[in-house]
Image (tube, coloured by chain):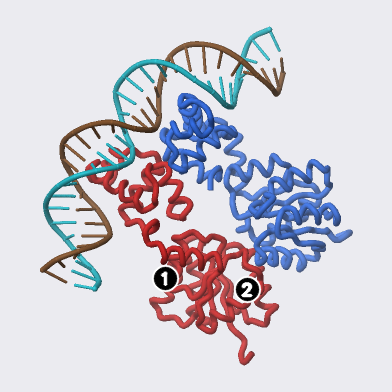
Chain colours: A red, B blue, C brown, D cyan
DNA sequence: GTGGGCATCAGCCGATCGGTTGATGCGACG
DNA sequence: CGTCGCATCAACCGATCGGCTGATGCCCAC
């Protein structure tokens, strides 16, 4: 290779971070910094300007998605490789939309990680097979998916707490009829017919919890 | 130290596994084997008879809890240190009850991991602060907790799928009255008043999902 | 400038739910 | 042997939900 690829690794689990760093170092990459939360990651990327940021989505404080957005806003040249445990719809879609260069799951073999980092540095997009499948199915069938609106999420959150339609209406300062309309839309979007199933689907998709 | 502590590491995430192994090797421990699933872990522990098994609870196939139970059934001398991402009620309680020697979360600093392994090898019990808190609060307040019975979990699972009481009754070959009774008990145990909230609580506690 | 998504509201109605009370049988534990 | 948890069932009833039809206003995009 011509020049060593410089990398910052951001993950709130020390053990995982060590693992990633270890794998990358063994492959001759140059790990220039490590972060345990989003703010730290942003600071390191700004000052160190690495080729690649390996990023966990779920972190205390500033979320991974937010990190990506703020990097893109600053027009950083650093490629972002998301490396996370979860492959819920919302996580994947949000990360890609925010501008992640790649998305890998932690159950991927280390060789995949190494390849992904190389590709990310080159500006190529890499996706885990599971992630790619999820994205593809979403593009193919826009019917049973679709994102919930802000208002709908508010309603659903209250539903998950056992709040009654009437109480939700009071809580959101709208009429009960409006709440029922929102719920109907939520059911349609999630492909269910009652509030209990809606809550379950929301958890499965990472909308709640 | 007198003799090097022998360890088997079981985790389905290669990256995490590398991290743990790296940390342990750097500390002079002897990592004698690595497993990517439960069956493999059982096999390695049996043939290698290590001092400590570092175990992830969530793995494909044989679960971590099952691994612990089968090791205890075989009266293995190996101490089990659970190292996992989640600290849901059911996971923690199940692991401890199954006979885990220690329970650590992946967001623990590496020094804690090293200490925990040492303690586990010595047969001492180590718990993450968060885990300890959870256990303590459970012991203190037996009211708002309590485990769901097998039957109750079946009912709740169907509820989460949007199944109607009548349909649940048909599905389980019981009367609708029975289903309603079960649901009432579920509500009591989870501290909620309707099925939607019950589903949400179940997800939060790791009973579903 | 017209369509589409979103948020808001109304009224109606059958279906479903959740609470209550009470009862039986069974296995476990002391 | 009594008690306790679990699973099972019954009947009743008010409250709530979910579906339906239809309507208004807003903003954005094509």
Give the side of residue B18 with respect to residue A119, left or right: right
Q: Mark 2 — on which chain does it sit?
A: A
**Which residue in the protein does label 2 denote?**
A112
Does dot 1 land on a helix, a strand or a loop? helix
Q: Position of residue B137 (x, y in %)?
A: 57, 38
Q: CA distance from mark 2 to mark 1?
A: 23 Å
- In the rendered image, the vertical position of residue A13 relative to residue A52, given as above or below: above
Residue B65 is labelled as none
Q: Position of residue A118 (x, y in %)?
A: 59, 81
Q: Nearer the viewer, residue B158 or A104?
A: B158
Give the side of residue B122 with respect to residue A37, left or right: right
Q: Nearer the viewer, residue B44 or A192?
A: A192
Counting other residues with Cα less than 10 Å from the Cα at mark 1, is it few (<14), some (14-19), or many (20 or more)?
some
Q: Position of residue A173 (x, y in %)?
A: 24, 45
Q: Position of residue B50 (x, y in %)?
A: 83, 55
- In the rendered image, the vertical position of residue A54 relative to residue B126, given as above or below: below
Q: Nearer the viewer, residue A59 or B36?
A: B36
First in sequence: mark 2 vs mark 1 = 1
């Amino acid at each position: 290779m011509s020049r060593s690829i410089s990398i910052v690794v951001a993950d709130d689990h020390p053990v995982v971070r060590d693992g990633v760093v270890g794998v990358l170092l063994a492959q001759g990459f140059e790990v220039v910094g490590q972060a345990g939360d989003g703010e730290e990651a942003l600071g390191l990327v700004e000052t160190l300007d690495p080729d690649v940021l390996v990023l966990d989505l779920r972190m205390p404080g500033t979320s991974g998605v937010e990190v990506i957005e703020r990097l893109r806003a600053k027009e950083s040249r650093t490629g972002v490789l998301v490396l996370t445990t979860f492959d819920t719809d919302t996580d994947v879609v949000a990360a890609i939309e925010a501008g992640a260069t790649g998305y890998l799951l932690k159950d991927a073999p280390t060789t995949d990680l190494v390849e992904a980092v190389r590709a990310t540095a080159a500006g190529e997009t890499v996706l885990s097979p599971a992630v790619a499948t999820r994205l593809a199915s979403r593009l193919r069938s826009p019917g049973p998916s679709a994102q919930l609106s802000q208002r709908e999420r508010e309603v659903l959150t209250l539903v998950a707490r056992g709040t009654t339609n009437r109480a939700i209406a009071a809580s959101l300062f709208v009429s009960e009829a409006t709440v029922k309309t929102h719920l109907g839309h939520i059911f349609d979007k999630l492909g269910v017919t009652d509030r209990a199933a809606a809550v379950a689907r929301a958890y499965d998709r990472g909308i709640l919890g």
